[in-house]
Image: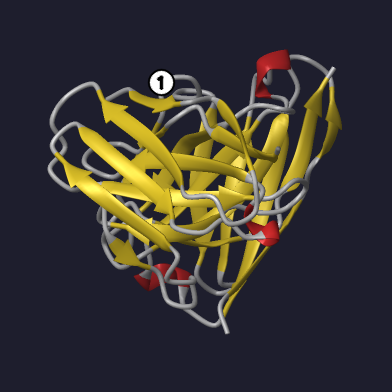
């Protein structure tokens, strides 16, 4: 069974850093397409970053240069290093698996809340 | 690519036929997915590639469209369908519509 479990969220001051981690089971992160999608309180969904099986990374302009997506194949985890955090980064961050090599999000983690204040 | 959903909210009764539309700012073939999100829950994939039903999703959900205009239809609204629905384009870097909240009338 595919499962994604995020951790690492919390309260951080503006300008601070936080590292999110997503533990995957039921599949191998190194051979998968994975993304981070966030949702500000009471707002809609926003894709922010992706890491493809070949190692290519993608970022939305809103986080480019501040966030870094990576994976640890030995631990089967996906990570998101977030630096220079801003109030507008406050959101629930979801780790999401993409269906095959598409940008269709078929499995979602339960999310972890990041509050920048 | 911008995805514009309408309406932003609607009220309906159990048994009603509900239609939600999504318009893309440019042609995206059939690269649209639909998700359902209940309050406090994780989004769930309903429809992919405009009209393909995700495994386990009830057949009362259907999708259609191509190019710039897409539709999600619930043929007979059930109590468990009250939620917010999002479209998402998978043609380029993914973007989501603003959501449609389906409420009880």
Quadrant assignment for the C terminus of chain B = top right
Please state if B70 lies on the left or on the right of A95 as rendered: left
Quadrant assignment for the N terminus of chain B = top left
Q: Position of residue A19 (x, y in %)?
A: 69, 42
Q: Position of residue B84 (x, y in %)?
A: 60, 41
What is the chain identity of the residue bearing mark 1? Answer: A
- Asked if residue A59 is positioned above or below residue B17 in the image, the reply reads above
Residue A97 visible? The answer is: no
Label 1, secondary structure: give it: loop
- Between A7 and A68, the residue placed more toward the observer is A7
- Between A29 and B20, the residue placed more toward the observer is B20
- Between A109 and A32, the residue placed more toward the observer is A109
Residue at the spot 69% in from the left edge and 50% down from the top edge = B38
Q: Position of residue A81 (x, y in %)?
A: 61, 39
Residue at the spot 40% in from the left edge and 50% down from the top edge = B73
Q: Position of residue B63 (x, y in %)?
A: 31, 53
Q: State which quadrant residue A59 falls in.
A: top left
Residue at the spot 43% in from the left edge and 31% down from the top edge = B97
Mark 1 neighbour class, 10 Å CA radius: few under 14, some 14 to 19, many 20 or more: few
Please state if A45 lies on the left or on the right of A117 as rendered: left
- Between A110 and B20, the residue placed more toward the observer is B20
The colour scheme used here is secondary structure
Q: State which quadrant residue B89 falls in.
A: top left
Query: How many badges with numbers are in the image?
Result: 1
Residue at the spot 72% in from the left edge and 53% down from the top edge = B41
Residue B68 visible? The answer is: yes
- Asked if residue A49 is positioned above or below residue A12 in the image, the reply reads below
Residue under pointer 1 = A61
Q: State which quadrant residue A9 falls in.
A: top right
């Amino acid at each position: 069974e595919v499962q994604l479990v995020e951790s690492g969220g919390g309260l951080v001051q503006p300008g601070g850093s936080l590292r999110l981690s997503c533990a995957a089971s039921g599949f191998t992160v190194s051979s998968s397409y994975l993304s981070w999608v966030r949702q500000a309180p009471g707002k809609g969904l926003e894709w922010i970053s992706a890491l493809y099986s070949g190692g290519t990374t993608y970022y939305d302009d809103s986080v480019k240069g501040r966030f870094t997506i990576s994976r640890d194949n030995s631990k089967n985890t996906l990570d998101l290093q977030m630096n220079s955090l801003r109030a507008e980064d406050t959101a629930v961050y979801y780790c999401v698996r993409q269906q095959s090599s598409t940008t269709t999000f078929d499995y979602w983690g339960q999310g972890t809340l990041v509050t920048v204040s | 690519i911008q995805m514009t959903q309408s309406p932003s909210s609607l009220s309906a009764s159990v048994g009603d036929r509900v239609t939600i539309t999504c318009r893309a700012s440019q042609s995206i073939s059939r690269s649209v997915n639909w998700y359902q999100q209940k309050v406090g829950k994780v989004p769930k994939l309903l429809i992919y590639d405009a009209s393909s039903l995700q495994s386990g999703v009830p057949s009362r959900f259907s999708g259609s469209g191509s190019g710039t205009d897409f539709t999600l239809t619930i043929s007979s609204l059930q109590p468990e369908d009250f939620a917010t629905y999002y479209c998402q384009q998978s043609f380029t870097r993914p973007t989501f519509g603003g959501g449609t909240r389906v409420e009880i009338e």
